[in-house]
């Protein structure tokens, strides 16, 4: 996973060809010494487009996770710490937001605002807010009962200091673990939206749109589908394995259970 997204982050320097450069004289060529993963219907190098697609997925995944954490973690922390009416109202808002299926919400946004990448990032971020809110709330509900939090209150620490310095830092382990899973889900959903034509628009190299373009030539040029599908599978699997490793490292008791 690190290699894939690492190469994607330096795609302009390691990609062998311009991902947008078309050459119809070499269209639909299979893998060769010149084009390692072959070319597409316009003669563009598939390896270069996959590398640039990795950069796009990395950027979108990070931004979606940042939006989800930036809104969900503070909301969950306040909801879990103060409880009462604030918790009730906050959780009902989260329930409302969670009631919208991801693809359906993306279709609605695309119908209203058009299929733009900025809106896709926003949708992916919004969809992850309920996950972070509930996760952080549950963790804070446990942490705020611990003795060192009571000791901080006893010595006169204000509630804001207690939350920021004592409760929240010790409640973030599940959030960090979930971030890897949310990253994988964002990559997968981005590919799904791209396949439906609701994500990055051509000629932008994006894994899902590459799959959509390649399915027309599946019988004659299967490499156009095989390599993007393989890269998506490897990226999602690797991110899930990273999440498992983080869980083992940050929550060994939960992993043993």
Image: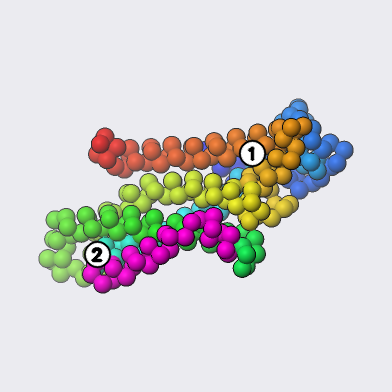
Residue at 79%, 32% (x, y): give it.
Answer: 29
Q: Residue 133: give x, y in percent of width and height.
A: 36, 59
Q: Quick one: label 2 or label 1, which is nearer the N terminus?
A: 2
User: Mark 2 or 1, which is nearer the eye?
Assistant: 1
**In the picture shown, does residue 64 fall above or below 85?**
above
**Left or right: where does residue 183 sit relative to residue 116?**
left
Label 1: how many residues lie within 10 Å, few (<14), some (14-19) or many (20+)? many
CB under 8 Å between discs 2 and 1? no
Label 2: how many residues lie within 10 Å, few (<14), some (14-19) or many (20+)? many
Residue at 33%, 37% (x, y): give it.
Answer: 248
Q: Residue 194: give x, y in percent of width and height.
A: 63, 51
Q: Which mark is residue 81?
A: 2
245 or 182, which lies in front?
Answer: 182
**In the picture shown, does residue 125 fall above or below 213?**
below
Q: Is residue 33 visible?
A: yes
Disc 1 target residue? 228
Magenta extent: 83-109
Q: Which mark is residue 61?
A: none
Residue at 79%, 41% (x, y): give it.
Answer: 41
**Left or right: where does residue 30 sit relative to residue 149?**
right
20 or 187, which lies in front?
Answer: 187
Residue sticking out furthest to the right: 25
Secondary structure beneath label 2: helix
The rendered magenta stretch, by its main secondary structure, is classed as helix
**Left or right: where does residue 166 sit relative to residue 46?**
left
Is residue 102 covered in magenta? yes
Is residue 206 covered in magenta? no
Residue at 79%, 46% (x, y): give it.
Answer: 21
**In the picture shown, does residue 89 fall above or below 230?**
below
Separation of marks 2 and 1 at Cα, in angstroms: 45 Å
Q: Residue 167: give x, y in percent of width and height.
A: 25, 59
* Rendered image quadrant of residue 257: top left
């Amino acid at each position: 996973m690190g290699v894939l997204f690492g190469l994607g982050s330096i795609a302009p320097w390691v990609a062998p060809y311009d991902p947008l450069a078309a050459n119809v004289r070499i269209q639909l060529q299979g893998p060769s010494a010149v084009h390692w993963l072959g070319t597409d219907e316009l003669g563009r190098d598939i390896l270069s487009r996959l590398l640039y697609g990795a950069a796009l997925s990395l950027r979108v995944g990070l931004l979606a996770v940042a939006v989800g954490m930036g809104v969900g973690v503070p909301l969950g922390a306040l909801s879990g710490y103060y409880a009462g009416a604030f918790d009730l109202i906050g959780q009902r808002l989260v329930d409302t937001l969670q009631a919208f299926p991801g693809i359906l919400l993306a279709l609605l946004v695309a119908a209203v605002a058009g299929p733009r990448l900025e809106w896709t990032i926003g949708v992916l971020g919004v969809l992850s807010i309920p996950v972070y809110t509930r996760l952080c709330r549950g963790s804070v509900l446990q942490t705020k009962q611990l003795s060192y939090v009571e000791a901080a209150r006893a010595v006169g620490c204000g509630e804001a200091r207690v939350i920021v310095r004592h409760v929240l830092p010790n409640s973030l382990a599940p959030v960090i673990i979930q971030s890897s899973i949310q990253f994988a889900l964002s990559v997968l959903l981005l590919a799904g939206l791209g396949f439906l034509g609701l994500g990055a628009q051509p000629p932008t190299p994006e894994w899902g749109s590459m799959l959509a373009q390649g399915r027309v030539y599946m019988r004659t040029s299967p490499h156009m589908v095989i390599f993007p599908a393989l890269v998506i599978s490897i990226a999602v699997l690797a991110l899930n394995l990273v999440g498992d490793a983080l869980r083992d490292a940050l929550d060994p008791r939960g992993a043993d259970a």
